[in-house]
Amino acid sequence: MKRAVLFGIIAVLVVTSVTFAGAAPRRGGTLRVGLDADPPNMDPHQSTAAVDRQVFQNLFDKLVDLNQDLEIVPMLATSWTIADGGRTYTFRLRPNVVFHDGTPFNAEAVKYNFERMLDRTFGSNRFGEVNLVTGVTVVDDLTVRITLEKPYSPFLAVLSDRAGMMVSPTAARRLGKDFAREPVGAGPYKFVEKRPQERIVLERFDRHWDRTAGNVDRIIYRPFTDENARLANLRADELDIINQVPARDVPALRTDSKIRLLERSGLGWQGMWINVTVPPLNNKALRQALNAAIDRRTIVRVVFGETVTPGNGPFPPGMFTHSAPANSRVPERNLDLARQKLREGGQPNGFALTLKITPGREVQQVGQVIQSMVADVGIRVNLEIVEFGTLLAQHDAGQFQASLLGWSGRPDPDANIYGFFVTGGALNNSKYSNQRVDTLLDAARILTTNDQRRRAYAEIMAILNEDLPYLFIYWPKDYKTLGPKLQGFVHVPDGMVRLRHVWLNP
Amino acid sequence: MSRFLVRRLLLTLPVLFFVSVIVFSLISLIPGDPARVLLGEEVSTDALEVLRKQLGLDRPLHIRYLYWLGRIVKGDLGKSVRDGRPVLDTLLQKLPTTIELAITSLIVAWAIAIPAGVLAAWKRRSAWDYGATTVALAGISIPNFWLGIMLIYLLAVNLRLLPPSGYVEPWIDLSRNLRLMVMPSIVLGSALAALVMRILRSSLIEVLGTDYVRTAHAKGLNDRTVVLKHAMKNAMIPVVTIMGLQLSGLLGGAIITETIFAIPGLGRLAVESILTRDYPMVQGVVLFAALAVVITNLAVDMIYASLDPRIRLEERTA
């Protein structure tokens, strides 16, 4: 009896120790990441491509970061206070942090970084994100105070992305614009080499402040523009994680025994831009007719299956502003309403419309479904495929009636709406102008609590649903596909591949 | 021979000049502001102004061309707008990759085409002939992108015989480099083999009908000696032309194959540069490709001359 008990205890100990051993991070190995495009520029202050940010997550530390719930969490800044109605941010910085080249990270370094972004002769692409900053003061070695021209609630979210990534002042001063070729940050991995369209190699930085970071020895990023080839490489065990999979592969990947598919709702939105300054859609009733003739749920079901969510606004699930009914309630298709609006707009038999789309299977299918749906009320859609760069030019010149184009999304709601619908906004392709919306958009930047901001955005959405400069159609989900070796990956809805705490099983 | 060579080399300069003017004008005609495309989602009116100035887009076209020409003469192809690296550096980095892919593809093509062509001509109208022709036609008809993906799934994913895609420099890991070249070379080579095979076949048939071949037969030489030793040399002349054209085409990059197999060659570079309106890089790639065509043409002419003495003499009297 005693022996049985003894055996039992030993068995339990063995089992628990084995399971814990399996769950403990292992150091070592080379992690291979498959990206959907080749990141062109390794300088966060100059970068414009979204895919650059993937590499930056592990090369550069930022002042603050995001967790899985899109909340702001400390990184290089350990705490902060906001005063003066939202105009003054005082950050306490983490001690004993060095850049990859040994330069110490401190308040002076933060000040230098902001000066670099605001320097008009340098021409940083982050300027528009931080141009409200009027001053950066070094209070002491580990305290920095940033003052803004006016309150700006999205500021911390901005600092959780490229504008908050700290570059080594020594390297940046020495290299200027060539910093992109020899980037020096404070992240857990340092830069080794970059061969265009071939690979980017990072290596563990041994003096990183987070002793639990950097389990993997090296990270290799490889671009695969062809999505089939990317997935094939993952399947053939040549990659450990890939970013983005084709929608049609998702059902099979869900049941695949060897690789894991992670799914989260994303931050972006997709739909139709409408130029409100040219006929036929300069007529609001006709825009409403078009909107009523579209069935969002069917479009999603036919083209994407479960890989996107039908939507009606710029705030996908997961954002704190999502729940406003004007944003989240997906209207039903209503042909009677459509016909009524057509009569109101003076076109009872419908009208002709050219819808521009970029090359791509899925967007073409969306276009075709829309085309057939609105034909039921006499709206005759002509689909025109236009190369992306050309489409951008046509948008700027207002040479279009409608186009299918969306936005990849940012964590703070302001970045998902402001530039698109404010009068004269750089991303306002519709040329829409509404003073009440402008006022509310500016107010939502100044208001400080989530509740207040949510109410402001709800009111904006109610107006946009009426005026329809843009028809929101769906919210893409974010997918990450992992091979069997990669462990400890945390999937954050901003779609970024954060690798500092992952490890590889053999 | 050397006078011939010098004359041909001098002729390349006007060709390159002409090509550069055409390319420069054509790219500028593509709609889309490079600054706008570069900024993509990060656009703001300030950023646009600054970038346009940096790119020199505020100057008129012919001024920009003259600036560019002036730098080219000094060997400076400018800097890529997308990543700031010197264009020449990037081109030189990708050139060995493209050359390697071109050569391995041609080897595959010739390995298929030459035996098939000789066999088809020698045993014409037999089962060998029809069989070889069918295989050759299949090679042209099967689309590159389909064949590529099929090969990846079959050989790399299912059978795990070869790595699926990518590239590693031969001096870093030669065995992996060669294994990575197998599938792309098959894809490209199979498409090229067909043409070579057909041309060789008809050329060889024609040569086999000439007087001197009949004389050789009459002398009592066996079939194999006649075909391989006497007829092939002459039959190869049009084949060498085709090979030259194919090589110069490949040196411009094989876009689809490079994309599927993630090979960092000049083809992908060209397409990406056009889509991102990276003017300096497009100029550089096209100029490179034009140079490649000119040089391979020259090499082909040299080979002609060595294959057929009549050509050498003609050149001299002309």
Image (tube, coloured by chain):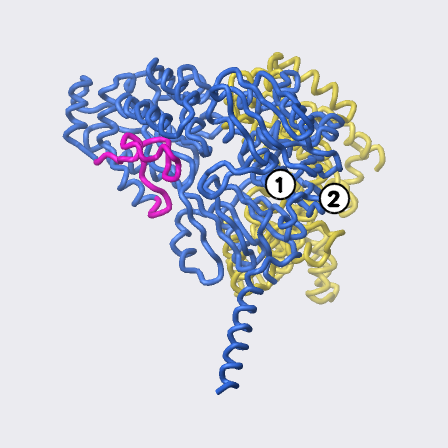
Chain colours: A blue, B yellow
Q: Most extreme residue toward the right, as rendered? A: B2
Q: Amino acid at mark 1?
A: Gln
Count residues near mark 2 (Cα–Cα under 10 Å), then give few for <14, some for 14-19, many for 20+: many
Where on the picture, by quarter, is residue A78?
A: top right
- Please give the chain letter of the residue carrying mark 2: B
B9 vs A231, nearest the viewer: A231
Count residues near mark 1 (Cα–Cα under 10 Å), then give few for <14, some for 14-19, many for 20+: many
Q: Nearer the viewer, mark 1 or mark 2?
A: 1
Which range of residues does the magenta coloring cover?
A: A304-332
Left or right of residue B227, residue A383 in this image = left
Residue at 72% across / 32% down in the picture?
B88
Report the Cα–Cα distance between label 1 and label 2: 38 Å
The number of numbered discs placed on residues in the rendered structure image is 2
Residue B218 lies within the magenta run: no
State the image coordinates of residue A410 (x, y, percent, origin top left): 46, 33
State the image coordinates of residue A320 (x, y, percent, origin top left): 38, 35
Tell me, for residue A307, which label it has, or none. none
**Secondary structure beneath label 2:** helix
Give the position of the N terminus of chain B as an image quadrant. top right
- Residue at the spot of label 1: A197
A499 vs A110, nearest the viewer: A110
- Residue at the spot of label 2: B304
Where on the picture, by quarter, is residue A376?
A: top left
Left or right of residue A60, residue A483 in this image = left
- Please give the chain letter of the residue carrying mark 1: A
**Secondary structure beneath label 1:** loop
Is residue A167 positioned above or below B151 on the image? above
Whether residue B270 can be seen here: no
Q: Are marks 1 and 2 in contact (CB under 8 Å)?
A: no
